Structures are given as structure tokens and as C-alpha cells.
Image (spheres, rainbow, N blue to C red):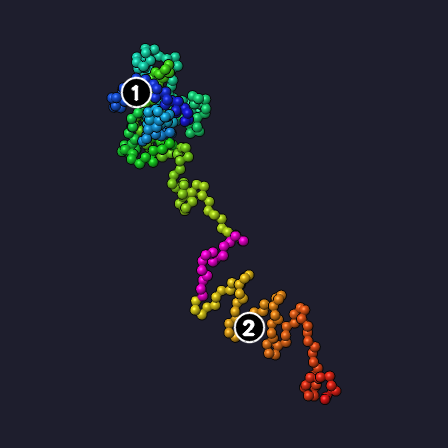
């Protein structure tokens, strides 16, 4: 729809606005009611009601909006057709030089058809009549209670409202047709935003989420982080408590407390553990077992290889 809007506004920029210039100089209240109508509820698109927009560099910026009229709204279309006819009659007497053009350009387009450049309208235009109205002067924008709208965020592409339009005849470089002048706009209710606009609730949600937000998955297995993070000091044990066991590669073995035996850590290259009094030594792999001495049952002394009993 953007190119069709630009083409239409370019025609209006170059046109010799017979009734339109009359309207701009004298004010909206002085317009004839034959060419001015107010719509029923319509949907707005390409909204530029607070800041004027120039179609191309060097052109005069204008306030404008595209109006989507439901095809079921026969009353609004009947008023529009009557206003266009009245503007055409004025054009014959003025801008068109006394003769009605064979095929004057019509500002109303079929949203189920194609744009003047041959491209299809957007999906929001389906089932609607489409026209664009613009003005060199900023028009009043009010709410349902007729109070002026100060919060510009309430006026966006996709909102529903009513629009006052003045139709006029123009002629420029052989192009003759009917244009639509923008009048006051009344905003009635919210609608689904067009053009990718989302609300703050959609963006952020009620719990920190929102559109496109996905919380990071919880680490599992090997990727889990131990309770003690890198860069943090190890927790010091309180008085009377034993420090937590953190045995691992490169760490010194835990020292036994007074009266306790150290844990057995027999391994390669380590000296054999010395037996305590009354215990037999532990036999390990590769160690020679000393021969056992024979004891004399009478004297209780070891036998040294002598005569039995001596």
C-alpha cells in the first residue's frame, strides 16, 4: 500500500486544488456540506496525524491517514458517492474547465483488488474500500468524549475511529480527478496494531517474559556449576566444626585429628604402613615375607638351630 499512497499523495501535491485551496484558506467550518462527509466507524492505517510526512525530498509535508471502510457499511459509501458527485459538478465549473473528464481519477480503491501500480493490497484491506485523505494543516484528533487526545500513542495504524473528509476536484498536467481532504478525526477504540507494532504487555509480559523471550535452560549433568562459584572464597568452618572434605587431585590429604588413625592411602610409590603394637604387618604386592621363627615350647625362646631344649 505504500507505493499507492505515495502515488496518490504525489498527485495531490502537484494538483491545482480548486475546492481544496478554498478550504485551506477559509477553514473547515466554511466548507459546503455537499462535498464533506463524516464516516461511520472505520479503521486507520498509515497514520500521520500529529507529524506531517513528505512523500519525497523537497515536497511539502502533509498530515494524512489511509481509511479502511468495511464494504458492509453501505450508509458511509452512499454519503461518499454523493459527495464525490457534488465535487465533480464543482470541478466542471472550475478546475476541469467546463467539461467532465472521461475517466477522472477516483480516490476510492477496492481492497480486494490491486493498487494502481498493479500490486495487491495488504491483508488488512480485504473486505474494505480504501482511500487516503491528507491536509496541509493539522486537524483536530479527539476521543469518544470529544476531548482532544494528548497521548499520541493512542493513535496508531490499526486503531478504529471516524473521519471527516472533504472531496474536491483537481487538474494537473492532464491528470484530472477527485481528491480527499483530511478533516477532524475521532478515535473510538483500540484495534490490532498494523505494521508490527506491539504493546508493552506483549513485549515484556507479566513475569519478565514476552514476545520471543525464552529463559535459559537449567544446566544438567556435566554443565552444572558447583555451589562454590569461581572467584568466591571458600566457606570457613565455624568454631568446633570440621571443614568440609574437598579431596581431589593436587590437594593435600586430610590430616587426622588427635587420637585418630590416618586413612589408609596405600598406593604405588608409597611406603608401607607401619603396623601398630600387636598387629601383623600388611603384606603387599612385591614384598618379601620374613621366615617365621620356631619357638621352644619349654623355654619359650626362639630356636637358633641348636639341639632341641638347649
The picture quadrant where one finds residue 147 is top left
For image coordinates 45% across by 70% down, the residue present is 240
98 or 127, which is in the foreground? 98
139 or 89, which is in the foreground? 139
For image coordinates 50% across by 51% down, the residue present is 219
108 or 291, which is in the foreground? 291
Look at the picture and state if 68 lies above or below 299: above
Q: Which region is colored magenta?
A: 222-237
Image coordinates for residue 158, horizontal then vertical, percent: 38, 32
Q: Earlier in the sequence, mark 2 or mark 1?
A: 1
Quadrant of image for the C terminus: bottom right
Image coordinates for residue 241, horizontal then vertical, percent: 46, 68
* Left or right: where 258 falls relative to 22: right
Image coordinates for residue 249, horizontal then vertical, percent: 55, 61
Q: Would you name the residue on which mark 1 appears?
A: 20
234 falls in the magenta region: yes
Question: Mark 2–mark 1 contact, CB under 8 Å?
Answer: no
Look at the picture and state if 91 lies above or below 221: above
Judged by its main secondary structure, the magenta piece is loop
For image coordinates 33% across by 26% down, the residue present is 61
Which dot marks residue 261? Answer: 2
Amino acid at each position: 500500500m505504500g507505493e499507492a499512497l505515495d502515488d496518490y499523495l504525489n498527485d495531490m501535491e502537484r494538483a491545482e486544488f480548486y475546492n481544496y485551496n478554498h478550504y485551506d484558506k477559509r477553514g473547515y467550518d466554511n466548507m459546503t456540506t455537499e462535498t464533506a462527509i463524516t464516516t461511520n466507524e472505520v479503521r486507520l492505517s498509515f497514520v500521520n496525524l500529529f507529524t506531517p510526512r513528505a512523500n519525497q525530498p523537497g515536497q511539502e509535508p502533509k498530515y494524512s491517514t489511509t481509511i479502511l471502510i468495511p464494504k458492509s457499511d453501505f450508509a458511509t459509501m452512499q454519503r461518499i458517492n454523493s459527495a464525490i458527485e457534488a465535487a465533480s459538478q464543482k470541478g466542471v465549473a472550475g478546475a476541469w474547465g467546463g467539461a467532465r473528464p472521461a475517466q477522472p481519477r477516483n480516490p476510492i480503491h477496492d481492497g480486494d483488488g490491486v493498487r494502481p501500480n498493479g500490486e495487491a493490497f495488504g491483508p488488512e484491506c480485504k473486505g474494505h474500500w480504501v482511500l487516503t485523505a491528507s491536509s496541509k494543516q493539522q486537524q483536530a484528533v479527539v476521543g469518544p468524549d470529544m476531548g482532544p487526545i494528548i497521548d499520541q500513542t493512542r493513535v496508531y495504524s490499526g486503531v478504529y475511529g471516524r473521519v471527516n473528509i472533504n472531496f474536491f476536484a483537481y487538474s494537473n498536467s492532464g491528470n484530472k480527478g477527485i481528491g480527499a481532504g483530511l478533516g477532524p478525526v475521532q478515535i473510538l477504540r483500540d484495534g490490532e496494531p498494523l505494521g508490527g507494532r506491539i504493546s508493552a504487555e506483549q513485549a515484556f509480559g507479566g513475569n519478565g517474559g514476552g514476545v520471543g523471550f525464552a529463559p535459559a535452560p537449567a544446566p544438567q549433568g556435566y554443565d552444572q556449576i558447583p555451589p562454590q562459584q569461581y572467584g568466591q572464597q571458600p566457606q570457613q568452618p565455624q568454631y568446633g566444626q570440621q571443614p568440609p572434605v574437598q579431596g581431589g587431585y593436587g590437594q593435600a590429604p586430610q590430616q587426622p585429628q588427635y587420637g585418630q588413625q590416618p586413612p589408609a592411602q596405600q598406593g604405588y610409590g608409597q611406603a608401607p604402613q607401619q603396623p601398630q603394637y600387636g598387629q601383623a604387618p600388611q603384606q603387599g604386592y612385591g614384598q618379601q615375607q620374613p621366615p617365621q621363627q620356631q619357638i621352644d615350647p619349654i623355654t619359650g625362646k626362639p630356636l637358633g638351630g641348636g639341639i632341641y631344649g638347649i
